[in-house]
Image (cartoon, rainbow, N blue to C red):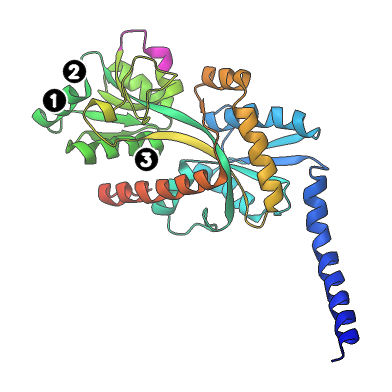
Amino acid sequence: MHDPQRRRLMAVLGAAWAAASLPLQARAAKWPERPVNFIVPFPPGGPVDTTARFTTQPLGGMWQVPVVVDNKAGAGGIVGAQAAAKAEADGYNYFFASIHHAVLPSLRGNLSYDVTQDFVPVGMAAVFPIVLVVHESLPVKTVPELIAYAKQHPGKLSFGSSGTGGGTHLAGELFNSMTGTRIQHVPYRGSAPAMQDLLGGQVQVMFADGPSARPHLDGGKIRPLGVGNPEPSALFPGIPTIAASGVPGYEAYSWSGLLAPAGTPVDVLKRVNGDMVQVLGNPDTAKSMLAAGAEPRPGTPQEFGAFLQAEIDKWGKVIKAAGIKLE
């Protein structure tokens, strides 16, 4: 091929490639041009929903477009995840995942989506501390004392949880596996009835979510021994971590983070992450979230992706070792 012909062909191909790439570049540059949708896989009022609303309301103001929090509850977070996995990857659809979505792959083998393949990470949003509390009648005031008592009285202690396979259940199983104790699990249909039975002494121990525990800590019926966060919690000042109280390496807390359908434009993801970090770092937003029982935890997409995979691996081992199965 003669040079003039070759140059003309390369020019045509270059123009065609540039034209093909323009829509994606244009979308990223002009984004957002219409409402942005955020799927929350739980009912309104819960910690993940509250976090979503505290996060997305300021984002709507920054973007000057409506933001929609779409609650698609059902099947322990599966219904919302399925809908989000099928959503168009155009930069206008997002999904607030939780610890449930790191646990479900090990609890159910027939999920119609893959949380690590069908989504890409945008960023961590918040953590919800889990607090180890005991009934006032139990003669223990520290984590080591609880471990010693449980080993001296095998089969006597039981811990309540919000349900089989949930964060408050797995926190107890992790504690058992790391301490060699055998505190028996008693599942309930939610945190509220589990807390009521702890207050009544029907169960003696609970790895309670923060919002369930806080109102009762000053009442004298339950006694806090430690928090599952790796560092002391701003929500529970003065309460040591379980890790620093005789169980090195112990970490158990609920969390929420933002995912997007795989294929979402990278430039848009960077924009959403940057704006989300700015919102979560705002003192007013942080104050409101802390009052609702959530600790803001902004970060990069890479950090959240690594965290999600680590959670899947960690809880998969706990579930297998404890033989946990969903009925």
Residue 233 on the magenta span: no
For the residue marked with disc 3, what is the amino acid?
Thr
Instruction: Give the magenta range.
Output: 214-221
Q: Residue furthest front?
A: 3
Whether residue 244 appears in this view of the structure is: yes
Whether residue 218 appears in magenta in the rendering, the answer is yes
Which residue corresponds to the image point at 37% horizontal and 40% vertical from the top-left? 164
Question: Could you tell which of marks 3 and 1 lies nearer the N-terminus?
Answer: 1
Give the side of residue 125 with respect to residue 228, left or right: right
Disc nearer the start of the sequence (2/3): 2
The image shows residue 220 at horizontal and vertical percentages of 31, 8
Q: State the image quarter where residue 6 is shown.
A: bottom right
**Answer yes or no: do the residues labelled 2 and 3 have beta carbons within 8 Å?**
no
Q: Tell me the residue that label 3 is attached to.
A: 164
The label shown at residue 149 is 1
Q: Residues within 10 Å of mark 3 (few under 14, many from 20)?
A: some
Tell me the amino acid under the disc marked 1: Tyr
Q: Which residue is mark 2?
A: 140
Question: Residue 246: x percent and y percent?
Answer: 21, 29
Instruction: Pick the quarter of the image with the N terminus.
Output: bottom right
Q: Which quadrant of the structure image shows residue 60?
A: top right
